[in-house]
Every structure is written in structure tokens, then in C-alpha cells.
């Protein structure tokens, strides 16, 4: 009997049971295999497989080797065996081993997404997570635990809680989260760590590189300091980003304005920077027909002659909600405000209850958090986002894809969604009077229809989330 030696290494940590589900896609990995007679078709003995390794992440320790490596009920981790030229693909225990063959086992690769809270995993990254799963990857979500974890696990993502992770400013909590992340990465050994959000984006890139993750990717969803912010704030934010970017391998940037600024200020090395863009599900968010529109408006108690000004967002001052309430009050009937989103009392700029009570007293509808936002867009006549800061606003893209004109503030992010006079209007930040004027200009149904049609066309051309998934997987060295 001859030996076939495959390049690879044994990991230090054991793979937890049940992890490393099979896939028809993945990376070729190495293992030491004995008992294969060259030029013959032989059974590859399970007891000689050892620990299979995928980009530093193993499957099938000694206790689970037979079940995971050799297709126990419901599993087929030993998915394919190939010769050096990619031929001779088979399933199961039987291995074709022609002379001078190099046997390769194709198994999933582990991708870890790091965010502050599970809400980001679900509402910002679901398409990317599902894209990786479809490509055969083992996807791990790392964040604070919240109510969205069961949904994500049902979709196939595995969740690991990050203790200490919080959206509030807490140096002690962030240090605790960084230590917890180190332990998670050393245990899980992901092939890729993809970081998101401001705080985990800083410590995550540093910890990931120091922990030996082969590929560290970061997405800038929107620099936390805008060009018109005070210089001290910009220096702190840009400085921290510059330090963290030296620890990553790839820097994905959603907004072209941020990309240009990062190049100009040398916040990240040019060779690492890539434009990612942003997108939404164009099948889910699409113009409603008349029956759908009437049903939605009727369910909310909206009259046929009322002009509904809608916003989908967290109820915080940064979203410009105080100005929006003032603007709709200035306009009066037939305009009516529809606010869709949760109250966020933990944020420093949470809206006072007195302001919300005043809005409802004048006819505003507050739905709270809703899962059916795609249907609620059907009840609106115009979407309004008077935000103070945005990266690349998802809700505005959803509204455009749903065939609504969009009135937004003239800031980074909103400028990428709205073409003034074509798909909507842009107004100055914190200017309720200008906001009311812009909303008033779309009272004509013909104007709303024309701008809504143009907005849908722009969304189809520029905001398809499938393109974002393709660029993300390309950054991992993977295709859809």
C-alpha cells in the first residue's frame, strides 16, 4: 500500500459537533490519507482521515469522524474527491486514485460576520449571509443576542453571542467584547472575518488579524464623521479608521463619497479599497397595484383623498423626525404622517414621548416596528427621509423600488438615491420649512406618478442587492 500525502495541517481546536455541514462548493483541503492503492478504486478508511482542515477550520474530530466524514444519515461532509485535474468526482467512501493523484476533499468554508447587535445581521446583511450559504459556506454570526437570532438560525446561519457588545458608548464593554471576540475566533477558526458597524469594525479588524484569521474584510456602511462635522470629531474617527484598516485585507465601502474621502485622506491603503454599493430585494419591494394600495390604506384608516407622507426608520432625532413632524404640521390637510419604526430609548437622541404624542394628536400614524414594511410602502404617497447622517439609506432605496417619490436631505447617501426633479427632491438638513415646500410640490398625482416610475427604474439599475452579494463574495475569493 502506498501513501498519498495531501498538503494541510491539523488544527489546535476541535470542531464542535454538528458544525461543518456539507456542501457541493468549497475549498480544497488537505489531510493525511493511508490505505489508498494507487491506480485502483479503494475505500478511504475513516480511522486514517485525521482532522480535515478548511482554511484553518476543521470538521470531524475523532468522536464524530465517522458520522461527519463519511455520510451518516443527513450528512455528507466527505462530499467530493478529485484528482489533480479536477476529474474523477465521486461521493461517499469509494475513492478513485489514479497514479500520481492528489486527492482533494471539498468541504464548506467558514465565514464569520461581526456586528454590534443581531438586528444588523438580519436587516443589513441577510442577503450576503444567504449568498454565502448558497455558495456552500458555513456562516457564523457574532453579535449581542437579541430577538432576531431564531430567524437567522432558521435561515441556516449559526449564531455565537458576543458578550459585552453594546450600541452605547462604553469603553469597558468594548474591551470586554474584544476579549470575547478573541476567544471566539481562536475557537472557531473562521476562514473569513467580515466586520460591520463602527465599534466592532474598529476592534474586530485588529483582533481578527492578531488572532490569525486568514482574511479580514470590513464594510464601511457610512463613515461616522461627515465632511462638515467638527474637525476634532473627524480626526478621531478618521484616525481610528486608519489604524483599523491597516489590520484588514479588504475594505469594502458602500458609498462612493466615502470612498473618495478615504482615498484623499489616506484613511485606508488604496490597494485595499473597493466600492461595494448597496441594494435591496427588488422582487419584494415593487410598486403595488390599486387593490393592494386601497387595502393597506383602509387597514390603517387612511382616507382616499389623504396624501400620506411616510418614513421607515428608528424613532430618533438623527433621522430628522422632529423636522418632519413640523413640516407636515405646516402643510396641514390633506397631508398625513405615517411613521414606521421602533422607539429607541437607549439612544442619546431618542425622541421625547411628548413629541410623539403631539404628532398623533394631529393625525400622525405610528405603527411601531413592523415586518411588513414592503406592504406599508403601498399606503404611502411620498417617502420622506430628512436624516442628519446616512451611509447609504436602505429605506430610501426600498421606497424608490416601491415606486414612491423620495424627498430627502442633501447629504451623503441620500444624494446617491435621489435625483432632484427626477425621482424626488433634496433639501437642506434641519430645515422644516424647505422640507414642507418640497413635500407640497408632489401633491399633484401626475408628478408623484412620474417621479415614482423614475425612482423604480433607478432602483432596478442601481440598487439590486444581488450585485452587492456578488461583490461581497468576490472579496472572499468566491463566486455566486
Image (tube, rainbow, N blue to C red):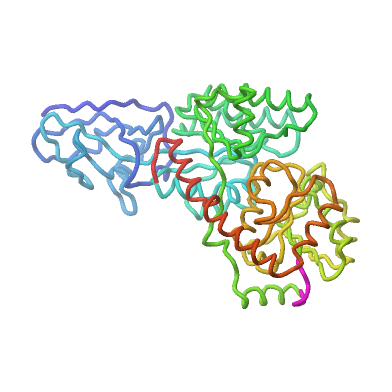
The percent coordinates of residue 35 (x first, y second) are: 16, 33
Is residue 25 shown left or right of residue 149? left
Q: Which residues are magenta?
A: 302-308
Closer to the camera in the image, 52 or 229? 229
The percent coordinates of residue 63 (x first, y second) are: 35, 39
Find out whether residue 304 is within the magenta segment.
Answer: yes
Tell me the quadrant of the picture where the N terminus can be found. top left
Closer to the camera in the image, 441 or 216? 441
Closer to the camera in the image, 248 or 171? 248
The percent coordinates of residue 58 (x first, y second) are: 38, 34
Which residue is rendered at x = 47% and y = 41% of the image? Answer: 471
Reply above or below: 130 against 294.
above
* One can see residue 322 in this view: no
The percent coordinates of residue 116 (x first, y second) are: 64, 39
Which residue is rendered at x = 44% and y = 36% of the image? Answer: 476
Reply above or below: 280 against 166.
below
Which residue is rendered at x = 39% and y = 27% of the image? Answer: 11
Is residue 87 shown left or right of residue 354? left
Amino acid at each position: 500500500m502506498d501513501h498519498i500525502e495531501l498538503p494541510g495541517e491539523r488544527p489546535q481546536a476541535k470542531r464542535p459537533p454538528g458544525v461543518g455541514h456539507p456542501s457541493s462548493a468549497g475549498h480544497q483541503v488537505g489531510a493525511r490519507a493511508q490505505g489508498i492503492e494507487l491506480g485502483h478504486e479503494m475505500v478511504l478508511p475513516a480511522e486514517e482521515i485525521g482532522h480535515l482542515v478548511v482554511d484553518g477550520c476543521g470538521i470531524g474530530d475523532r468522536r464524530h469522524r465517522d458520522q461527519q466524514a463519511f455520510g451518516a444519515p443527513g450528512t455528507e461532509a466527505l462530499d467530493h474527491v478529485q484528482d489533480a485535474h479536477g476529474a474523477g468526482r465521486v461521493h461517499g467512501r469509494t475513492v478513485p486514485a489514479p497514479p500520481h493523484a492528489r486527492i482533494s476533499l471539498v468541504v464548506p468554508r467558514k465565514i464569520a460576520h461581526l456586528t454590534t447587535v443581531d438586528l444588523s445581521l438580519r436587516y443589513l446583511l441577510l442577503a450576503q449571509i444567504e449568498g454565502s450559504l448558497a455558495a456552500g459556506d458555513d456562516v457564523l454570526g457574532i453579535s449581542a443576542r437579541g430577538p432576531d437570532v431564531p430567524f437567522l438560525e432558521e435561515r441556516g446561519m449559526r449564531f455565537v453571542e458576543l458578550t459585552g457588545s453594546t450600541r452605547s458608548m462604553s469603553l469597558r464593554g468594548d474591551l470586554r467584547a474584544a476579549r470575547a471576540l478573541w476567544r471566539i475566533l481562536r475557537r472557531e477558526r473562521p476562514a473569513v472575518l467580515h466586520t460591520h458597524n463602527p465599534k466592532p469594525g474598529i476592534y474586530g479588524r485588529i483582533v481578527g488579524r492578531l488572532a490569525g484569521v486568514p482574511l479580514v474584510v470590513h464594510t464601511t456602511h457610512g463613515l461616522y464623521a461627515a465632511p462638515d462635522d467638527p474637525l476634532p470629531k473627524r480626526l478621531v474617527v478618521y484616525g481610528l479608521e486608519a489604524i483599523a484598516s491597516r489590520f484588514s485585507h479588504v475594505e469594502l465601502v458602500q458609498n462612493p463619497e466615502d470612498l473618495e474621502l478615504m482615498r484623499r485622506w489616506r484613511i485606508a491603503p488604496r490597494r485595499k479599497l473597493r466600492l461595494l454599493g448597496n441594494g435591496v430585494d427588488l422582487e419584494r419591494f415593487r410598486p403595488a397595484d390599486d387593490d393592494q394600495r386601497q387595502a393597506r390604506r383602509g387597514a390603517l384608516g387612511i382616507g382616499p383623498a389623504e396624501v400620506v407622507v411616510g418614513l421607515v426608520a428608528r424613532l430618533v432625532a438623527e433621522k430628522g423626525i422632529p423636522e418632519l413632524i413640523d413640516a407636515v404640521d405646516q402643510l396641514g390637510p390633506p397631508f398625513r404622517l405615517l411613521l414606521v419604526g421602533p422607539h429607541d430609548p437607549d439612544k442619546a437622541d431618542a425622541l421625547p414621548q411628548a413629541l410623539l404624542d403631539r404628532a398623533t394628536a394631529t393625525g400622525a400614524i405610528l405603527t411601531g416596528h413592523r415586518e411588513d414594511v414592503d406592504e406599508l410602502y403601498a399606503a404611502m404617497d411620498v417617502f420622506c427621509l430628512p436624516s442628519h447622517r446616512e451611509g447609504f439609506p436602505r429605506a430610501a432605496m426600498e421606497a424608490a423600488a416601491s415606486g414612491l417619490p423620495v424627498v430627502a436631505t442633501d447629504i451623503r447617501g441620500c444624494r446617491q438615491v435621489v435625483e432632484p426633479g427626477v425621482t424626488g427632491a433634496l433639501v437642506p438638513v434641519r430645515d422644516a420649512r424647505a422640507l414642507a415646500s418640497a413635500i407640497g410640490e408632489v401633491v399633484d398625482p401626475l408628478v408623484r406618478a412620474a417621479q415614482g416610475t423614475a425612482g423604480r427604474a433607478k432602483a432596478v439599475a442601481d440598487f439590486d442587492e444581488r450585485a452587492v452579494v456578488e461583490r461581497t463574495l468576490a472579496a472572499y475569493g468566491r463566486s455566486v
